[in-house]
Amino acid sequence: MANQDLLKLGRVTVGAGGSFEVFPGGTESNSFIRVTATFTAGSTDVVVTAPKTGYYGIEYFRPGFLLRKTGQGWTNNVTKVISVNLGTNTIEIEDEAGVNASGTTYGRISKGMSFIQSGSLVTPSGYPIWLYPSVTGSQDSEYNTDYSKWATLIPLALTSSDSNTVSSAYGVYDISEITDRISNNLSSFYISASVSYPEAPDYTPSSGISSFAISETTLTSSIAPLFGGDDIGVSEGLGFAAAQNQTQFLSQTTTFPFTGSAQISGSLAVTGSNTFLLNNGNEFKIKSIKGTSLDLLNVNGDTNVINFHAYGNADAKPTAVLGGIYFTSASLFIGIE
């Protein structure tokens, strides 16, 4: 049964027992993942031989991340991570290694994702206590699709200068994966942009902040609530971040084309040219096509027979059109020139 409570709200911040830090994606920072690895010329398999003290290891690589190693001949010394096998400590990469080599390798988070290290949870004063164990990401084994997702509302910075927070620029990101449930009030996790909350091309979560908002989202639309910043001790602008992003999303989807299914009740008027493209095996069903005042074509639902409209006035024939067809009550005419 779906959660019927009010949407939970709180603040993620610096706290006792953890070193709060935001590792933003889409930057050229090498401060997140560092490992010692062995490369074999002509191979796309990289064997991780040891972690580097003070950095995250192979278990924090995700498909789509960038792997950096100088001297391999890749563009800007980076290649994309395809998959990670923790059983064999092997990373599959997009481009073959250019030479045999061993040494320090860096991992960069892909654009659209970021990592939150040791965020301490603070809940609103007087609100019933809720804790990190109730927070799950869509990639967690604990995630139940009958329950709401969770999101962060976070100040943004430019990817070219990720520690310099841009005033009045905020992003909403789904919590996609909880990696470390350190305690009831301390956790590390990945956040990700989504269709509902896309990430602006030149922006990323700021690494120069000391807190941001966390919120449960609606079950059907994954929308975060509006709130006053003072409610949880964050900037007032964060309280409107959800509305800012939803307005952007709605402006992109209020007109066709869009991806997905649409149920339309009532009439749909289409002006201009239109084309219906079908995937193999799919059906396209038409009940009727109407002109200004007449049914031009309809399909009999019982017999599946297609009926064309019969032209009513045999004395007022329409202008012949090549390939055109029209009926009277007694005759069939086909335009051949």
Image (cartoon, helix red, strand yellow):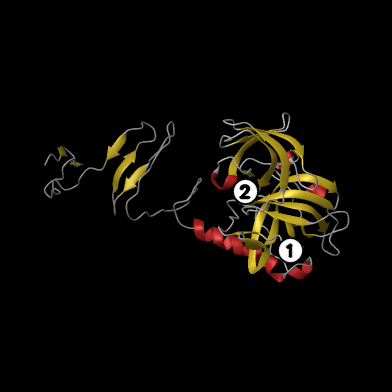
Please give the name of the residue rendered at 32% of the width and 51% of the height, measured from the top-left corner.
273
Amino acid type, callout 2: Ser
Q: Secondary structure at mark 1?
A: loop
Image quadrant where residue 85 sits: top right
On screen, 10 above or below 139?
below
Could you tell me residue 181's position as x and y percent?
82, 46
Residue 286, picture quadrant: top left
**Which of the two discs, 2 and 1, labels the residue nearer the N terminus?**
2
Q: Which residue is at the front of the view, 276 or 153?
A: 153
Q: Could you tell me residue 222's position as x and y percent? A: 65, 52
Q: Position of residue 14 (x, y in %)?
A: 82, 60
Residue under circle 1?
Answer: 209
For badge 1, the amino acid type reads: Ile
In this orientation, which residue lies closer to the viewer: 212 or 35?
A: 35
Residue carrying label 2: 110
Q: Please, what secondary structure does the residue beneath circle 2 have? A: loop
Position of residue 230 relative to residue 308, above or below, is below
Residue 320, percent from left and from top: 13, 46
In whole angstroms, how far apart are the C-alphas of marks 2 and 1? 20 Å
**Where is the N terminus found, in terms of image quarters?**
top right
Q: Is residue 55 above or below residue 233?
A: above
Residue at the right extreme, as displayed: 16
Q: Residue at x 59, y 45 (%)?
A: 77
